[in-house]
């Protein structure tokens, strides 16, 4: 997985003219393919590759272009002909705003990445190690006395606490973690519906689902304002990401605006809780359904750490555990759908993409493609051994993105997930409790629907 620049093949006056992409079957009047995307999006998007490398879809009156081939998703992500925009980002705008690193484009995005990047440098991550280890072992201890674990609550709580304690050091994590998790759970479900079934003004009608969504949105924004106000009122300036934001300057040397600070904190909390929490849930599902994974992780931890608790310093040696995490990211990517928008007419894979067009692609579909992976539906951590991972086509596995939109916290997240997986799998094995529902829950992120587990001692 590299960040090499790849450009779509340019149009040539002497060469063949680009083609119109084929249309996907199954559109219905008014909603287009929105109904299929709402009912079973994973299956629908996974089948599109059989119809072409680029396929036309309709969402309501809008035409979208679905990109299905790994090489073309890489070209799309790295080309300056596309920006962050489209149905996904429009549905997220009420949450993420327009001035955070997740949604900004151009010079603003580049300046914001420079502000936050120092917090995620490789040499900065060991400083977070004690917090990650403390939270992982606290989770293990709490589960020793739990009869049934509500994995949704537990996963999001630990993800929020790690993100807040590492990147925005303060005492607000305990008081606000539950509110953050509850608000995001409601928001990410409602935002996906708004993306695929674009009913516009109908979402403003005060029916119970819309009122619940609006309450969650208002509470989350209030939480962020409280976090920033607490830091300012305390008068402290710890060396963390929140301080970097409060002291950041724009291109003219002036302090950045309040809205940008707000949107940046939103981005930190969203990525650090929703995507990481969803991945923790999927890891625990994998440990439950494939018990041998946990046994092998326990043996690896025993070899590396002996009788002491696993620590951050062990992470680099936990290669099998890390491969379990990577294979989970392949089969159950939290970010399973992405959209872009063209800024000019362009060509992708021999197909014409008009200016202003919305483009969609699914990491879930790409990472489960039988043309890229042997036994593509099988959970196999061994496929990430060096001698085997070299066989994976370029861009067929990019869980943290590529190019200038690559997640800046990729090494942070991998260290956090590897350490947590090692801690819980070496202490417990898991089984489903009554009422557990491991089926995928489709929202802006992907995670198990309702995971209830018993944690049994090793």
Image (cartoon, rainbow, N blue to C red):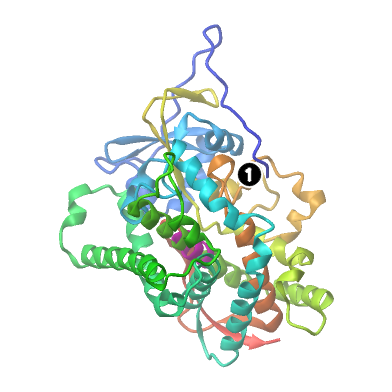
Does the magenta run of residues contain 411? no
Location of the N terminus by quadrant is top right
Classify 331 as above or below 70: below
Please name the residue shown 61% across and 87% down the image: 141
Please name the residue shown 47% across and 20% down the image: 19
Q: Nearer the viewer, residue 52 or 70?
A: 70
Direction top: furthest residue: 14
Residue at the disc numbered 1: 396
Location of the C terminus by quadrant is bottom right
In the picture, residue 456 is in which quadrant?
Answer: bottom right
Q: Nearer the viewer, residue 120 or 363?
A: 120
Residue 3, position as x, y percentages in the image: 64, 40
Magenta residues (range): 270-277
Residue 327 visible in image: no
Classify 218 as above or below 399: below
Classify 55 as above or below 153: above
Does the magenta run of residues contain 275? yes
Residue 391 visible in image: yes
In the picture, residue 292 is in which quadrant?
Answer: bottom right
Side of 35 where 293 appears, left or right: right
Please name the residue shown 39% across and 68% down the image: 227
Residue 414, position as x, y percentages in the image: 64, 61
In the picture, residue 53 is in which quadrant?
Answer: top right
Residue 403, position as x, y percentages in the image: 58, 40
Residue 196, position as x, y percentages in the image: 34, 49
Q: Secondary structure at mark 1?
A: loop
């Amino acid at each position: 997985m590299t960040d090499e620049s790849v450009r779509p093949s340019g149009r040539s006056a002497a060469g063949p003219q680009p083609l119109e992409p084929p249309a996907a079957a199954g559109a219905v009047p008014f909603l287009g393919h929105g109904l299929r995307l709402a009912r079973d999006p994973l299956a629908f998007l996974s089948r599109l590759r059989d119809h072409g490398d680029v396929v036309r879809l309709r969402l309501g009156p809008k035409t979208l272009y679905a990109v299905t081939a790994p090489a073309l998703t890489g070209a799309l992500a790295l080309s300056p002909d596309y920006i962050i925009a489209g149905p996904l980002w429009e549905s997220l705008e009420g949450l993420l705003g327009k001035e955070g690193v997740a949604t900004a484009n151009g010079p603003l995005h580049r300046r914001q990445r420079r502000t936050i990047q120092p917090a995620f440098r490789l040499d900065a991550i060991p400083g977070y190690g004690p917090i990650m280890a403390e939270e992982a072992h606290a989770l293990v201890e709490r589960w020793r006395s739990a009869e049934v674990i509500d994995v949704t609550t537990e996963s999001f709580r630990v993800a929020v606490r790690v993100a807040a304690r590492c990147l925005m050091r303060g005492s607000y994590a305990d008081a606000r973690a539950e509110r953050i998790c509850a608000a995001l759970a409601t928001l990410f479900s409602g935002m996906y519906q708004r993306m695929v079934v674009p009913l516009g003004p109908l979402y403003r009608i005060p029916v119970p689902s819309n009122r619940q969504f609006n309450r969650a949105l208002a509470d989350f924004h209030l939480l962020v304002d409280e976090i920033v106000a607490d830091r300012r009122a305390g008068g402290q300036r710890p060396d963390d990401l929140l301080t970097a934001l409060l002291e950041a300057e724009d291109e003219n040397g002036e302090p950045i605006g309040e809205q940008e600070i707000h949107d940046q904190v939103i981005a930190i909390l969203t990525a650090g809780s929703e995507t990481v929490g969803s991945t923790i849930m999927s890891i625990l599902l994998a440990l439950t359904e494939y018990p041998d994974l946990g046994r092998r992780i326990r043996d690896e931890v025993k070899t590396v750490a002996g009788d002491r608790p696993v620590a951050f310093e062990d992470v680099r040696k936990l290669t099998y555990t890390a491969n379990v995490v990577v294979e989970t990211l392949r089969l159950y990517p939290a970010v399973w759908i992405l959209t872009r928008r063209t800024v000019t007419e362009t060509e992708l894979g021999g197909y014409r993409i008009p200016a202003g067009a919305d483009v969609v692609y699914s990491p879930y579909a790409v990472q489960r493609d039988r043309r890229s992976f042997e036994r593509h539906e099988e959970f196999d951590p061994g496929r990430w051994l060096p001698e085997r991972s070299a066989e994976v086509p370029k861009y067929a596995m990019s869980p943290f993105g590529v190019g200038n939109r690559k997640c800046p916290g990729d090494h942070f997240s991998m260290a956090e997930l590897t350490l947590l997986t090692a801690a819980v799998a070496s202490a417990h094995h898991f089984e489903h409790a009554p009422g557990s529902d491991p089926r995928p829950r489709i929202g802006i992120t992907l995670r198990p629907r309702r995971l209830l587990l018993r944690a049994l001692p090793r």
